[in-house]
Amino acid sequence: MAEVIHTNYLLLPILERFDIPLGFGEKSILEVCTDHKVNVEFFLEIINSFHDHNYFPEVQLRSFPLHLIIQYIQKSHNYYLYTKIPQIEDLIQQLKSLYKESQKEQIVLIEKFFQEYKEEIFIHIQNEENDIFPYISTIDQAILQKRIDEKIKKMVHEKSIKYFIDTHTNIEDKLYDLKNIIIKYLPPAKDNSISHALLFELFRLERDLNDHARIEDKVLAPKVQFLESQILGK
């Protein structure tokens, strides 16, 4: 398992999403996953697809139970809300402190832009957590328990994952504009380390969100569509 981190340190947050702490010594991936009751096949597919963006086994990932996929997505949500966003906000405040009041126009713009972006992420996540995931769990349980009645069919007609796909916003896209403002228009400062750190974290967030979107759009949504077709007898 240690070699996984040596190969790509950007995989550290992925370990956290599987509740795998550091300090695993010389144990193999299988041993660590067994210790922490993690599905090793699912873990390997996730870290390999995150490590190599040319590798994305859509069919294989769809073969895993829905609760595993949703649990991973929810852990990703927690990472964005409680780790990455506060970290970026703190860097913006540090950056702001470097400038005199007369130089803060662009920093205030960056701060405002990110706050609006943060609100968009919150709405996106809240919609999934409060509406989409409960719906998916309900129809998944209906099929597992062979309890497909008219009420379930009506729910599928009213809340079909198609509506989620049609209205699903790409929350990672707007990060490009924010990075561009920093790269092109940020006033020079005595210490560039904070602006570089901020850019680095924005690039990391963008990459993570791209991976997140692939799993939602190419794994979760098609898997749910298949369940819906079973319920409706199509």
Image (cartoon, rainbow, N blue to C red):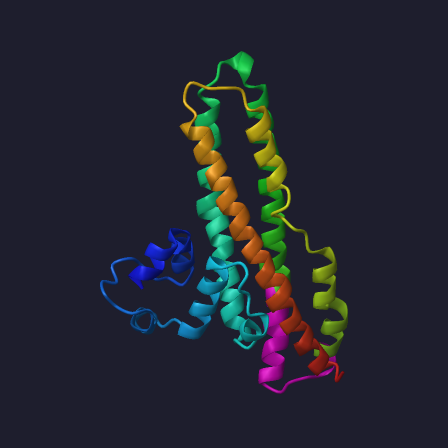
Q: Which residue corresponds to the image point at 59% horizontal and 41% vertical from the top-left?
A: 175
- Residue 80 in sight from this viewpoint: yes
Tell which of 173 and 155 is nearer to you. 173
Image spot of residue 200 (x, y percent):
47, 39
> Which image quarter is the C terminus in?
bottom right
Residue at position x 53%, y 58% from top? 53
Q: Is residue 198 above or below residue 214?
A: above
Would residue 66 be counted in the magenta stretch?
A: no
Q: Does the magenta stretch include residue 142?
A: yes
Magenta span: helix, strand or loop, mainly? helix
In the rendered image, is residue 39 in sight?
no
Instruction: Determine the residue located farthest toward the front in the rendered image.
Output: 54
- Please say if 53 is above or below 229: above
| Residue occupying image coordinates x 43% and y 25% | 192
| Residue 119: x %, y % from top left | 60, 42
Kindly give the residue lying farthest to the left in the view shown: 25
Residue placed furthest toward the bottom:
146
Location of residue 23 by image quarter:
bottom left
- State the count of labels: 0
Locate residue 128, reporting x and y percent: 61, 58
Q: What residue is rendered at 36% in x and 72% in y?
A: 37
Magenta stretch: give its range. Answer: 133-151
Residue 25 picture location, percent across and down: 22, 62
The N terminus is located in which quarter?
bottom left
| Displayed quadrant of residue 226 | bottom right
Instruction: Decide if residue 93 is on the left or right side of residue 158.
Output: left
